[in-house]
Image (cartoon, rainbow, N blue to C red):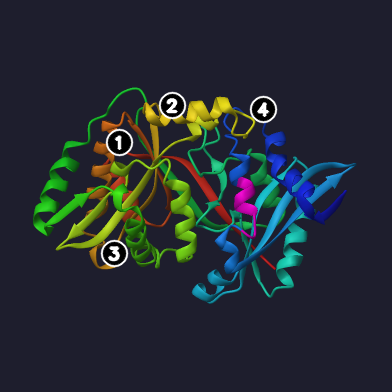
């Protein structure tokens, strides 16, 4: 067996292809679009690389790729947190401790040479992207932009000396087949809160999309800056994501809450396009997939949504504004035929957000874990 860095287009193609081979028989694994993965890994196109570096490695045995990993150094993370944490991501491996250990050791050595003292992951590339190892909830498919892995990955990491850094909880509520009314106490509480604080809510204005993105830029880093593991997003990174989200966004599912003309919070939920991707196992945007995707969006055939973001300015936290935003998303999603929702991920030690979800009768159904290993 040999571990070597990715060099050239052929190696990159093998790096991207591996999970499609490893998980082909897993009915719950959802193949991402290969073109999206290629763009994500492209150092020239992904603005993440304006403040970060990464090296991609392949594990090969007798000419076959049996594992992969990326070692990542994120200057913005280290400057923000005043630490020396490096990351690993895009980890895939056959069930073989020799292969996994060699990959982890290779990433460790690369990070050591750049002055890091902790290796954290999996994060592909950061907590603003897919992150965490699935440790509970293997029996259901992931939603859009959430990872999925076989159970043995946890054994590989534990045996390699990794320890828990933080658990990320994922909640679900509602049913795909029929509408579950919003709990009456939430309806009453939301209305009282809106009147008492003088709140107004509105959806995303697609006709003013560039300006709306600018408003989100102002809010995003202010709303999340105190969260564990948070990494600020640059303007270019938010523009990059907005470009990807724009074709599939449902304006009603991106609410802004305002008080006295000032935006004090917002939410972002997207239709779960994994329902479409799961039906097409190649990960390639074939004509059949394109037709399925366009019809599913146009005819509102997607029956699930994922709440990616829900943020409130620090001075308004603890006042129940998260419930106001959840109530809006719940009711507006139903108008589009979406009766099932996922909220996540949520830090295990974020009691305020967890309590708000549990009051709406959402329950934890998946747990992801970020691991640390001292270097």
Q: Please state if 41 lies on the left or on the right of 369 as rendered.
A: right
Q: Are marks 2 and 3 in contact (CB under 8 Å)?
A: no
First of labels 3, 4 by sequence position: 4
- Which circle, 2 or 1, is nearer the viewer? 2
- Which residue carries the number 2 mark? 295
Which residue position holds label 4?
25
Give me the C-alpha separation between circle 4 and circle 2: 27 Å
In the rendered image, is residue 3 in sight? yes
Q: Tell which circle, 2 or 3, labels the residue nearer the N-terminal end.
A: 2
Q: Which residue is mark 1?
A: 333
Mark 4 or mark 2: name the one nearer the start of the chain: 4
Q: Residue at x 28, y 42 (%)?
A: 252
Q: Secondary structure at mark 1?
A: helix
C-alpha gap between disc 3 and disc 1: 24 Å
Disc 2 and disc 1: Cα gap in Å? Answer: 18 Å
- Residues shaded magenta: 37-44
Is label 4 in a helix, a strand or a loop? loop
């Amino acid at each position: 067996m040999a571990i070597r860095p990715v060099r050239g287009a052929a190696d990159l193609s093998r790096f991207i292809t591996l999970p499609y081979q490893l998980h082909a028989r897993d009915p719950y694994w959802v193949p991402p679009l290969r073109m999206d993965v290629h763009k994500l890994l492209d150092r020239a196109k992904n603005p993440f690389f304006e403040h970060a570096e990464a090296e991609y490695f392949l594990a090969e045995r007798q000419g076959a790729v049996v594992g992969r990993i990326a070692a990542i150094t994120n200057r913005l993370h280290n400057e923000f947190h005043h630490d020396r944490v490096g990351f690993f991501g895009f980890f895939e491996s056959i069930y073989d401790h020799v292969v996994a250990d060699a990959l982890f050791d290779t990433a460790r050595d690369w990070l050591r040479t750049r002055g890091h003292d902790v290796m954290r992951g999996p994060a592909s590339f950061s907590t603003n992207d897919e992150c965490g190892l699935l440790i509970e909830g293997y029996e259901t498919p992931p939603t859009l932009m959430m990872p999925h892995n076989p159970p043995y990955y946890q054994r590989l990491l534990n045996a390699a000396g990794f320890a828990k850094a933080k658990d990320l909880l994922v909640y679900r509520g509602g049913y795909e087949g029929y509408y579950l009314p919003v709990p009456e106490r939430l309806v009453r509480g939301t209305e009282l809160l809106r009147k008492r604080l003088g709140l107004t809510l509105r959806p995303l204005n697609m006709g003013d999309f560039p300006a709306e993105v600018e408003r989100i830029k102002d809010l995003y880093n202010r709303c999340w800056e105190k969260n564990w593991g948070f990494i600020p997003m640059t303007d270019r990174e938010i523009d990059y994501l907005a470009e990807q989200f724009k074709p599939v966004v449902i304006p009603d599912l991106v609410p802004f809450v305002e008080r006295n003309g000032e935006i004090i919070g917002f939410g972002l939920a997207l239709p779960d396009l994994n329902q479409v991707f799961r039906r097409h196992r190649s990960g390639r945007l074939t004509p059949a997939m394109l037709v399925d995707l366009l019809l599913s969006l146009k005819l509102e055939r997607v029956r699930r949504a994922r709440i990616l973001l829900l943020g409130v300015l620090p001075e308004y936290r603890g006042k129940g504004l998260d419930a106001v935003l959840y109530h809006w998303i719940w009711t507006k999603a139903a108008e589009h035929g979406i009766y099932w929702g996922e909220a996540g991920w949520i830090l295990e030690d974020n009691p305020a957000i967890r309590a708000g979800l549990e009051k709406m009768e959402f329950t934890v159904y998946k747990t992801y874990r970020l691991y640390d290993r001292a270097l």
